[in-house]
C-alpha cells in the first residue's frame, strides 16, 4: 500500500470547477540508472492513472519514466452532484493502488 | 584554543544583536521549488508526514505501545523540534530528534531500533518536526550541551577533504555566491527533515551534512556519530530565532 | 556522389535547411514519437500553453502546467494532452485523456529533465486538430552530489 495525499476542497457548489491534487509515493525507477556495482536497475514505473467522478472519466494518463518520483497529478473536475471520486494507479511488478474520496456538492 | 573557540562562539551569538542578515535556503530557491514547499498539497514530504501520522497510533515492540499511548495527541510535542538537540540526563548525552525517537522505540516500546534514514523513522521525524512549523528555533540552554556545541563550531571552521574546504568558507564566507549554477545557501537547518529533489526522497540533516562532506571529497563521519551531532547542535544555535519550516523542500 | 547531385545540394541547401530545421531543431526520436501520436498530422502552433520555468535548478522534479484554450463543452472538448522532451533517453513523458467529467483543459505534473533541452506540449481538440507549444529549458545540475 503506497502512501497517497489527495487534496480537494471540503465542499463545492454545483457547476464549480474543482482542483484535485493527487500525490503518490513511488520511486518511478527509470530503468536508466545503475546501482553502485554498475548494474542496471530495472524499470519500476507507474504506467497508468485514472480518475473517475460518479463513474465518468475525468482524466486518464499514460505515464513514462520522465514523470518525477512520487508523482503529482493535478486535475480539474466539473462538480455536478455529490459523489465518489475514484483514483487508480497501475504499474510494473503488479503495482495497483486504489483510492476513493467523496466530492461533496451543495 | 578552547578560550578562542569560546570567544568565537560568544561573538557569533553577540552578532545576532545586529541587523539579522541570516537567510533560510528557502529564499535562495526558485519560485517553482518555493511553491512546492509552501503548499501542503504539492509538497512530496507530506507522503512521509502521513506515514508518521499512521505510525503515531500504531503499537510496536514487546510493550505493544504506540507513541499516542504515552504522548497523547501529537500536538503536545509542539515546540520540541524547534528546541532539539536536547540533553538526556538519564543517558548522560545529547540526542537529536531522530535519536530521541529511536530511544523511545528501544526503551519504551522495546522494539528494534531502525537503521539510519529508514522510511518509518523519517516519517515519524517529519510528523513531529511539522508540529513546530512556524515557531522560532529555540535551542536548549542546558549547560551540558556547551562542550559539544563548541566542538561543532570547531568542526564548522575546520578544513576537510581533498578540496580542503571548511563549512565556514562556503556557508559564511561565500553564501549568496554561486557554485556551478546553484546559489550557495548560508546552510541553516530550518527545514529538516526535507524532501531534496536531488535525492528524490526525504532525508535528515545528517544525510545532507554527509553529502556536503563527500562533496569536498572528505570521509563523512558515520550516521549518529558525535561529530554530526556536534555540528547539528552548533548549526541550530547559529540559526536560533529563525523560523522552523519543516518539512521542507530543497533542490 | 555525382557532380550534378553535389551542385543540387549546394544550391538547394539553403532551402532544404530551412525546411528541415524550423525555428527549433527537433531530434529524430521526438519527431517520430510525435508523428506516431498524431498519425502523421503536423501540429499547428497555438491554443495550447506549456508553463514551466525556463531555468530549472534541479532536473529531477520540474513542475509543468499545460492549459488549452477550449470551452470544454460536450460538443467542444479537449481530447488529449501530451508532453514530450527532446533529449531525455525517451521522448514521451505523458499522454493524458480528458473525459466528460473534466472541468478544465489543464493538467499539472512534475517531470524529469535529463539536460537542457526543448519540452513540447501537444493537445488534440474536439475537432481532431493537433496544436503545440514548445519551450526551451536550461537545466542546472546539483553542485553537491551524494556519491
Image: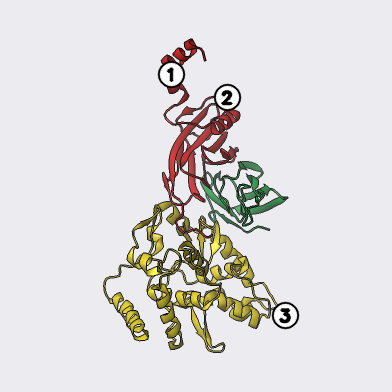
Chain colours: A green, B yellow, C red
Q: Which of marks 1 and 3 is in front?
A: 1
What residue do we see at 56% from left, 77% from top?
Answer: B99
Q: Name the residue under label 2.
A: C40
SS state under label 1? helix
Q: Mark 3 points at which residue?
A: B62
Residue B143 at least partly seen: yes
Q: Nearer the viewer, residue C26 or C6?
A: C6
Residue A99's x, y, as percent? 65, 53
Q: Name the residue under label 1.
A: C13
Label 1 – label 3 distance at C-alpha: 80 Å
Q: Which of C127 and B105 is in front in this view?
A: B105
| Crowding at mark 2 (Cα within 10 Å: few <14, some 14-19, many 20+) | few
Q: Is residue C145 above or below residue C137?
A: below
Q: Mark 1 or mark 2, which is nearer the start of the sequence?
A: 1
What residue do we see at 34% from left, 86% from top?
Answer: B3
> Do the residues indicated by labels 1 and 3 lie within the same chain of the protein?
no
Amino acid at each position: 500500500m503506497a502512501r497517497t495525499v489527495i487534496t480537494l476542497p471540503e465542499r463545492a457548489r454545483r457547476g464549480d470547477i474543482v482542483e484535485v491534487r493527487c500525490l503518490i509515493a513511488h520511486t518511478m525507477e527509470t530503468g536508466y540508472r545503475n546501482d553502485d556495482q554498475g548494474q542496471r536497475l530495472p524499470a519500476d514505473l507507474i504506467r497508468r492513472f485514472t480518475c473517475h467522478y460518479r463513474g465518468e472519466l475525468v482524466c486518464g494518463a499514460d505515464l513514462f519514466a520522465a514523470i518525477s518520483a512520487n508523482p503529482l497529478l493535478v486535475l480539474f473536475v466539473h462538480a455536478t452532484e455529490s459523489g465518489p471520486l475514484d483514483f487508480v494507479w497501475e504499474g510494473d511488478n503488479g503495482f495497483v493502488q486504489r483510492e476513493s474520496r467523496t466530492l461533496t456538492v451543495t | 584554543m578552547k578560550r578562542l573557540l569560546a570567544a568565537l562562539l560568544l561573538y557569533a551569538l553577540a552578532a545576532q544583536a545586529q541587523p539579522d542578515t541570516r537567510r533560510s535556503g528557502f529564499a535562495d530557491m526558485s519560485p517553482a521549488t518555493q511553491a512546492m514547499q509552501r503548499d501542503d498539497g504539492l509538497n512530496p514530504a507530506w507522503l512521509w508526514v502521513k506515514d508518521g501520522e499512521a505510525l503515531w497510533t500504531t503499537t510496536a515492540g514487546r510493550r505493544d505501545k504506540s507513541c499516542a499511548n504515552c504522548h497523547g495527541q501529537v500536538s503536545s510535542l509542539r515546540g520540541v523540534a524547534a528546541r532539539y538537540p536536547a540533553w538526556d540526563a538519564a543517558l548522560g548525552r545529547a540526542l537529536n530528534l531522530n535519536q530521541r525517537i529511536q530511544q523511545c522505540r528501544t526503551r519504551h516500546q522495546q522494539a528494534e531500533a531502525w537503521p539510519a534514514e529508514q522510511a518509518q523513522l523519517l516519517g515519524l521525524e517529519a510528523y513531529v518536526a511539522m508540529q513546530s512549523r512556524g515557531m522560532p528555533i529555540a535551542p536548549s540552554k542546558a549547560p551540558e550541551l556547551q562542550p559539544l556545541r563548541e566542538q561543532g563550531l570547531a568542526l564548522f571552521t575546520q578544513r576537510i577533504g581533498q578540496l580542503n574546504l571548511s563549512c565556514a568558507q562556503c556557508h559564511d564566507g561565500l553564501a549568496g555566491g554561486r557554485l556551478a549554477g546553484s546559489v550557495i545557501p548560508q546552510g541553516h537547518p530550518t527545514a529538516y527533515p526535507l524532501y531534496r529533489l536531488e535525492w528524490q526522497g526525504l532525508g535528515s540533516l545528517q544525510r545532507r551534512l554527509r553529502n556536503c562532506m563527500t562533496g569536498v571529497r572528505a570521509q563523512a563521519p558515520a550516521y549518529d556519530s558525535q561529530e554530526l551531532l556536534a555540528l547539528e547542535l552548533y548549526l541550530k544555535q547559529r540559526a536560533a530565532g529563525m523560523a522552523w519550516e519543516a518539512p521542507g523542500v530543497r533542490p | 556522389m555525382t557532380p550534378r547531385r553535389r551542385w543540387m545540394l549546394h544550391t538547394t541547401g539553403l532551402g532544404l535547411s530551412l525546411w528541415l530545421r524550423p525555428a527549433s531543431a527537433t531530434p529524430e526520436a521526438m519527431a517520430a514519437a510525435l508523428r506516431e501520436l498524431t498519425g502523421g498530422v503536423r501540429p499547428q502552433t497555438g491554443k495550447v500553453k506549456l508553463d514551466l520555468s525556463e531555468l530549472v535548478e534541479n532536473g529531477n522534479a520540474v513542475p509543468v502546467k499545460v492549459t488549452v484554450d477550449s470551452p470544454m463543452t460536450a460538443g467542444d472538448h479537449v481530447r488529449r494532452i501530451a508532453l514530450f522532451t527532446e533529449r531525455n533517453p525517451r521522448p514521451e513523458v505523458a499522454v493524458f485523456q480528458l473525459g466528460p467529467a473534466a472541468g478544465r483543459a489543464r493538467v499539472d505534473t512534475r517531470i524529469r529533465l535529463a539536460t537542457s533541452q526543448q519540452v513540447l506540449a501537444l493537445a488534440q481538440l474536439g475537432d481532431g486538430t493537433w496544436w503545440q507549444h514548445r519551450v526551451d529549458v536550461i537545466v542546472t545540475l546539483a553542485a553537491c552530489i551524494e556519491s
